[in-house]
Amino acid sequence: MFQIAMEKLEIPQEIPVGLAFKLGMSVLAHPLEVSKVLIQLGHEPVAPRATRTLLGKPALSLPSVFQYCGYIRRREGWSGLFRGITPRISSIALQSFTAAKFDEMVPPEAELSEEDTSKLTDEEKLHRFLKATLRDMANKTVCVIVSQPLQVLTVRAIAEFVGGEHKYSSDISGGIFSGIMSTVQDNGIFGLWSGVMPRLIGEVSLVAVSASITFLINTYLLKDTEMKKFTSNFSNYIAQSLTYPFQVVGNCMVVSRSGLAAGYPPFMPMYISWTDCFSHLKSQTQLKRGSSLFFRYYTGPQVLVGDRIMPVSSNMLKPPK
């Protein structure tokens, strides 16, 4: 029976060119992903330094993502920049395979030429848009649910940098086997789907928002066929900005109460749920942390002394002896 199931699954013998390129780029950019995830988790090991904004106002600057990579390399060597690389690459491949199988089972409608599209009424265009978008949202939902265990292993392997643990990166499988065992031991089988809800909301919303913006612009604003080719890139950028907070919350919930030092005070509050995490980060204006690669500013308590700005520390609040 297992053999029959595998035959029906039809695992591809060769990696598609598009997927191979995506995997290669993901490997090259993984150090940036490691730094970004640690920033999303709120880990700031380098003290902010005094600087000025582009408008000349005094501010406290945090290291850029590239400087953060340098800090990781100095502390752990090059291997530290590739924490979680195996489950991340596996997750990308699994999502690509799942999406392809979904397309086979629920094929998308054939693309219409510009001439055929112009013959459709507004109601018919809206119907095609809704049908295609709902199908894409269903595709994304399946991909997220299937790949979430690997996402959990990736984020937790990166989060180990905070406490110096090695539960998710210490075996021949690149941390996949040991990570699964550690997750099940610390959080039960459902721990493999920690943080799935905010991630699911974010990624499905990304599909819906991007498609909606593209449809509205191409249908009611643009008439130039050549310009319509660039609409999806613009729409995707806007949608990513709007849904980015769910990525931050999702990664925080993957680590929260995970058994890793990064998931407990003083590194992270004890969140009750993902909505609790969302509310707390929103109150601290931290929902966008990690979204900027270059210019990052400290937003915590600050005090201005003369023309210098400094972060408020606990030492400042102690009474004089």
Image (spheres, rainbow, N blue to C red):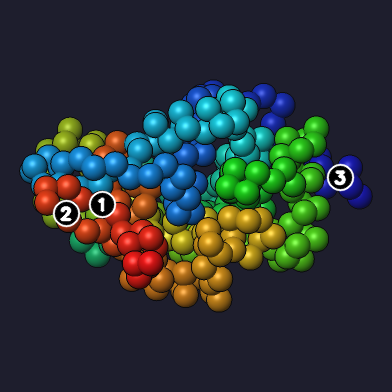
Front one among 30 and 137: 30
Point out residue 117 in the picture as x, y percentages from the top left corner. 24, 47
- The amino acid type, in three-letter code, at marker 2 is Val
Residue extending furthest front? 321
The answer to whether marks 1 and 2 mark residues whose Cβ atoms lie closer than 8 Å is: yes
- Residue drawn at 23 percent across, 37 percent down: 230
Dividing the picture into quadrants, the one containing residue 62 is top left
- The amino acid type, in three-letter code, at marker 1 is Met
- The amino acid type, in three-letter code, at marker 3 is Ile
Q: Nearer the viewer, mark 1 or mark 3?
A: 1
Mark 3 to mark 2: distance in Å? 73 Å
**Of pointers 1 and 2, the one earlier in the residue sequence:** 2
Q: Nearer the viewer, mark 3 or mark 2?
A: 2
Do we see residue 187 in this rendering? yes
Q: Which residue is mark 3?
A: 4
Q: Is residue 136 above or below residue 82?
A: below
Q: Which residue is mark 2?
A: 305
